[in-house]
Amino acid sequence: MIIEVKVPQLSESVTEGTLVAWKKQVGEAVVRDEVLVDIETDKVVLEVPAPDAGVLMEILRGDGQTVAPNELIARIDTNAAVDTANAPAVAPVVVAPSAVPTAPAAAVSPAARKILAEKSIAASEVSGTGRGGRVTKEDALKATPVAAAPAALSISLGNRSEQRVPMSRLRARVAERLIQSKNENAILTTFNEVNMAPVIALRKQYGEKFEKIHGVRLGFMGFFVKAACAALERFPILNAAIDGNDIVYHGYIDVGIAVGSPRGLVVPILRNASELTLADIERQIAEFGVKAKDGKLSIDDLSGGTFSISNGGIFGSMLSTPIINPPQSAILGIHATKDRPVVENGQIVIRPMNYLALSYDHRLIDGREAVLGLVAIKETLEDPARLLLGI
């Protein structure tokens, strides 16, 4: 039986993807759930598994080509798996765009051949709809050049050189959203400093026992998330969004945590973050880090969010102005904690200080709410007992 391999449903906001690399070639045996090809979207890389065991009979879309949800990309012959040794050889209909053989002259009409030559498209890259798979004039008119797989182009400039590499879908999407945020939001940033000594003392006192009981390290991010949630509950406008002429107040807090990955910056979502314990938060963040590193983040992991936190401190950043992630209206930037001289009770003392930055959309959020919200985060971090007492 011949079964079809189709592009899985992506998400409401993702309408297309790019075939990154086929892991199986035509004529090779596959087993059920074996990964056949990776599809890159502007959010994640999806693995397309084999729906059943058999022999890969056809590859209809090659590496580097753009595909849509539910589009047919390959066929598998399940009967060939019963006796692969005696199964007849199966010729590919379309293979990856690199090094494709030229189709026989009889398979292409003269008019189609002329049109394809003008478009610089190999006839073997076009699926014919005529009798016996013949490529017709209509097929040629509809055909579009195959997008080449991303490859670096090196240019020699004497004793210097340049390399030109196509943007990944993720990087292009990040660029698009940043420009959108800059152009559509009235972004303003307010700053404050926080003494991290109380949080550091808590981690030192309870860190070992926390890890033993919960199986995860007690990090700093859990405290930042809990402090941010407490502030958002006091100042709901920081957790709201603009939709046309309406203000949408979210009755929940979903916090996006910016995470670096081999593909670039991704922002997985801690859902209902205000209801999570410190252990829940640290556990989910650790899982996000592993999944980001392995390219296993799903679209659900990255969809939504009402507020974001960006931690430039892990890279040594002292201060930055984070850009809002639309349609959100605010984002908290945290930075490296460093020993710095500060004045307490008229005396200069050394304290582990962290500079906080809250960027907000001034169309929606007034300076008063932004400043007071950031002060609330500062006060909670400097007195973590507030988290237990709800004050």
Image: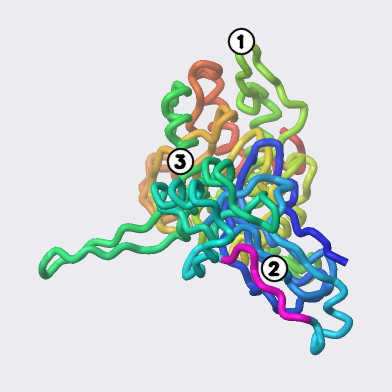
Residue on which disc 3 sits: 193
Instruction: Tell whether 349 sits left or right of 271.
Output: left
Q: Are marks 2 and 1 in contact (CB under 8 Å)?
A: no
Helix, strand or loop at mark 2: strand
Q: Residue at x 54, y 52 (%)?
A: 109
Quadrant the N terminus occupies: bottom right
**3D distance between C-alphas at marks 2 and 1:** 46 Å
For marks 3 and 1, give the one nearer the viewer: 1
Disc 3 crowd, CA 10 A, few/some/many (<14, 14-19, 20+) = some
Considering the whole magenta stretch, tell me its main secondary structure.
loop
Which mark is drawn over residue 36? 2
Q: Is residue 86 visible?
A: yes
Q: Which label's residue is closer to the chain start, 3 or 1? A: 3
Q: Residue at x 70, y 29 (%)?
A: 233
Helix, strand or loop at mark 1: loop
* Depth order, front residue of 252/110: 110
Residue 26: x, y in percent? 66, 73
Residue 328: x, y in percent? 59, 30
Q: Are marks 3 and 2 in contact (CB under 8 Å)?
A: no
Q: Residue furthest bottom?
A: 85
* Depth order, front residue of 112/371: 112
**3D distance between C-alphas at marks 3 and 2:** 51 Å
Mark 2 is on which residue type? Leu
Disc 1 crowd, CA 10 A, few/some/many (<14, 14-19, 20+) = few
Disc 2 crowd, CA 10 A, few/some/many (<14, 14-19, 20+) = many
**3D distance between C-alphas at marks 3 and 1:** 35 Å
For marks 2 and 1, give the one nearer the viewer: 2
Which mark is drawn over residue 245? 1
Which contiguous range is marked in magenta?
88-95
Q: Is residue 285 visible?
A: no
Residue 198: x, y in percent? 59, 52
